[in-house]
Amino acid sequence: MINRTFLFRAAYCLVLACTLSSTRAAQPSEASPRIFRAGAATSNVTPALGTTIHGGWGTPPSRHVHDELHARCLVLDDGLTRLVMVVVDNLSISREVFDEAKRRVEEATGIPASHQMMSATHTHSGPSARGENAFVFGRPLDDYQRFLAGRIADGVRRAVNNLEPARIGWGAGQVPQHVFNRRWLLKDGATAVNPFGGQDRAVMNPGRRPDLLEPAGPTNPEVCFVAVQSKDGRPIALLANYWLHYVGNVGADTISADYFGVFCDRIQELIGADRLDPPFVGILANGPCGDVNNIDVKGPAQRLAPFEQVRRVAGDVAQEVARVYRTLEYQDWVELQAAAAELELRTRRVTPEMLDNARRVLARPATVSPIHRHEVTYAERTLAAKDWPETVAVVLQAFRIGGLGIAAIPFETFTETGLEIKQRSPFADTFTIELANGGYGYLPTPEQHELGGYETWLGTNRVEPESSRRIVTKIMELLERVR
């Protein structure tokens, strides 16, 4: 497994070096007619009961499945180029899993890895796909990771099997009532202690405390989407993008795709796409929302039943998409392009002082009151961080679908980074998918690093503070290439 992974990674790097590479023989040739085609399929990726659930501070075993988890796959073909987009119901998926899935897809279909964009939704009610230790890089795949890679590849192959002449359209609506920046500044310059003994100016999920001043960053109320249908108007698939972390309140021991899965079911109903052959595939990819949640701390407190808010958010997003969907103008053919590149980022380095503090925390008797409720967790993460590699190579991507640009970043990206990409993009319409082609934790901007807070702590953030700027610069280059 290790040798095969090494060989694939080497081959993948060669593909990335020529990001607008020609495809293999299985790809359409220049002699092919310019017929636009689309195909979609899903793969069930639900683990067995008893698998631990990741997303909170604990990892309880699952005792119930409320709704199944899926890898939702869409393949587009303009007669010369094929693009693959996959969205998986999972908290975060390591690059190694996606690399293995892409290797299998390329081997079976000829679609190169650089033309495959795979991401996680960030549901907090599912298994881990980051391996035994999310803070250790490069380990062999575990049982669930191998299963997941295979099911992703199967879904893409089935989507290829479903390719048919199609037309495409895209649009955007507004759903502002469900997005709130979760990082808050306090009045009079007040600060809060962090697990390392320092003081933060930004507080994540502060609750309804009286000293809240203002959010530390923006939100994006937009929901963008791409829709494909057959030549006679039968819906094939719809891929939407909304910038909301997750909703939750589904039960600590319950597996669920969260509002992402409910949206897919609801949009199918709203646009009259039930029980079609091949089945319609709804997809909701997450956008830059590392600092956004669904909690209005300035509004009235609500007591909600499990899944009540999940259904409400998914329903509102689906209703808005369906409204815009009815106004779409479709194109019979658009040009497709893909560009991808690896970017080497420096990891956060642990100082001797941080190590000394972590060892002191872990050596304290249990009778000593902690300065922060998570100080032991972050002391353990500090010790683990001393063994991180000095750099990590991350995959960045850009797709062109006619006049639409799509960027992909393998981090929990802050909203302001996504808005900057949107504003600077050479395309009139652009959106960004986060946690794509890997998952390396949070990506605060340098300015947000200065404010501190959960998303900036060593352990939840792993790369140098300037990383977001370097990533935006590279994404701009990739969008220019596919333009």
Image: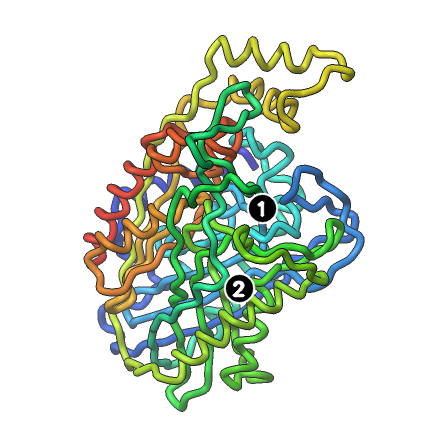
The secondary structure type at the circle numbered 1 is: loop
Q: In whole angstroms, how far apart are the C-alphas of marks 2 and 1?
A: 37 Å
Is 352 left or right of 275, judged from the image as shown? Answer: left
**Residue 9: x and y, percent?**
42, 39
Q: How many marks?
A: 2
**Residue at x 31% of width, y 48% of height:** 340
Crowding at label 2, few (<14), some or many (≥20) Cα neighbours within 10 Å?
many
Can residue 6 be seen here? The reply is no
Labels 2 and 1 touching (C-beta < 8 A) = no
As shown in the figure, which amino acid type bears the numbered disc 1? Arg
Instruction: Return the residue at label 2.
Output: 72
As shown in the figure, which amino acid type bears the numbered disc 2? Arg
The secondary structure type at the circle numbered 2 is: strand
Q: Nearer the viewer, residue 444 or 19?
A: 444
**Residue 96: x and y, percent?**
51, 41
Quarter residue 134 falls in: top right
Q: Nearer the viewer, mark 2 or mark 1?
A: 1
Q: Which mark is residue 208?
A: 1
**Residue at x 35% of width, y 45% of height:** 396
Q: Earlier in the sequence, mark 2 or mark 1?
A: 2
